[in-house]
Image (tube, helix red, strand yellow):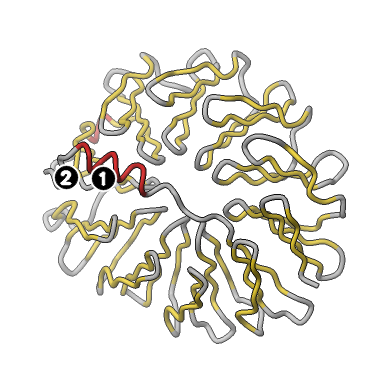
Amino acid sequence: MRFVTCNIVILLLLCGLSARPQGISFYNDYLGNIWVFDNDNTKQIDHQPAKSYGVGNNSFVYVDNSGGLKIYHNHFLHSASSFVSDYVVTDNLISFTMNTQLKVFDDGNFHTLCASMAKYWADDDIVVWYDDMQHMLMCYWNGKKYTLDDVLSTGEPSFVNVGENIAVFIDVNGNLNAFYLGEIEQIIYGKNLGGIALGRDIIAFVDASTGSFHAFYRNEFVDLEDFVPDTFKCGDRFVAYVDASSYLKVFEDFETRTISFDEPEFYDVEDGIMVFGVQNYFKAYIKGKVYTLESFIPKKYFINNHCVAYLDQMGNLKYFDGNKTEIISYEKVTDFELTGDAVRYSFGVKSENIYYEGKTYKND
């Protein structure tokens, strides 16, 4: 089944869906009012604290004091619904349910996806759901709905997973398929699947029938290893894995690089960055380069897009922007988080700051 066949269209989509603004955050003032931070500008949007919230690359989402769902996007506060059963905030899409009704907020527009949703899966650019009235597995991507599979004979899908702009599912014939840039591609027979991870433009999977490791990358199949890796994780257009010899490797741009011949103590992948620990050094990998951040492993850190926020051994809050590291606060930080490329942190009595593009913004 094919929906898009033009390579030029695929290249345009690969380039066009990745550039997003990344300066959204928020803070509460001393009276509990909510102030949104929007690319160097702040303004009050609510006079009571949020019951819950989520932040994407271009939206701030929260449930207000009365239980309504609010979405701040593109300098405007939208009232999404008077109540919400569930919501998922990703970098680019906000999916939410009202009982069995599934909706999505995409670049300022609301779309009703399903009136009788039994289950759904969401990531940055894609939403997949099972319509239990029509017995269809459906998908929303790039402003359109697609039918993935008719599951009337089986009752419900047996396996579904999503990455940032990609989805996989086992169809009624038992085959694992990928939905990617408007196309459906068969990957492997479902019973032979020995493990899988998804990112942006990439799927990494194990073929249990041969004990081998492979990738589906930008519409091409690539053989990675003859043996099953110990672990593997996908990010934006790359897969990181620890191979059978305990080497840390990265496959990116159709090349495989050995990042460390020493077995990593850990490694985490998010968006375009990987952080890992080797011999008690805290390191980051981004776009083919390795950076040593610290000679110890922080107890708490956050990674997002191409950035890292963490506390050093002295308790100072540090920020790695994908190129350099700097101290952004010498205060005794009580809490912090990384949203988009902005760091929001708390200290003292109800003091909250936001650090973004070399500047600090205060809630006083």
Q: Which residue is mark 1?
A: 181
Secondary structure found at label 2: loop
Rendering coords of residue 350 (x, y %): 81, 70
In the image shown, does 193 or 240 lie closer to the viewer? 240
Q: Residue at x 18, y 58 (%)?
A: 155
- Asked if disc 1 and disc 2 are in contact, CB closer than 8 Å, the reply is yes
The disc label shown at residue 101, or none: none
Above or below, 317 against 33 in this view is above
Above or below, 329 against 69 in this view is above
In the image shown, does 273 or 267 lie closer to the viewer? 273
Dividing the picture into quadrants, the one containing residue 34 is bottom right
Q: Which residue is mark 2?
A: 4
Q: Amino acid at mark 2?
A: Val
**Left or right of 220 on screen, residue 230:** right
In the image shown, does 73 or 348 lie closer to the viewer? 73
Q: Residue at x 26, y 48 (%)?
A: 158
Rendering coords of residue 322 (x, y %): 62, 37
Rendering coords of residue 359 (x, y %): 73, 55
Q: Amino acid at mark 1?
A: Leu
**Left or right of 257 on screen, residue 341:** right
Q: Which part of the image, by quadrant, shows the C terminus?
A: bottom right
Q: CA distance from mark 1 to mark 2?
A: 7 Å
Q: Residue at x 46, y 57 (%)?
A: 90
Secondary structure found at label 1: loop
Q: How many marks?
A: 2
Q: Earlier in the sequence, mark 1 or mark 2?
A: 2
Rendering coords of residue 248 (x, y %): 55, 21
Above or below, 162 against 128 in this view is above
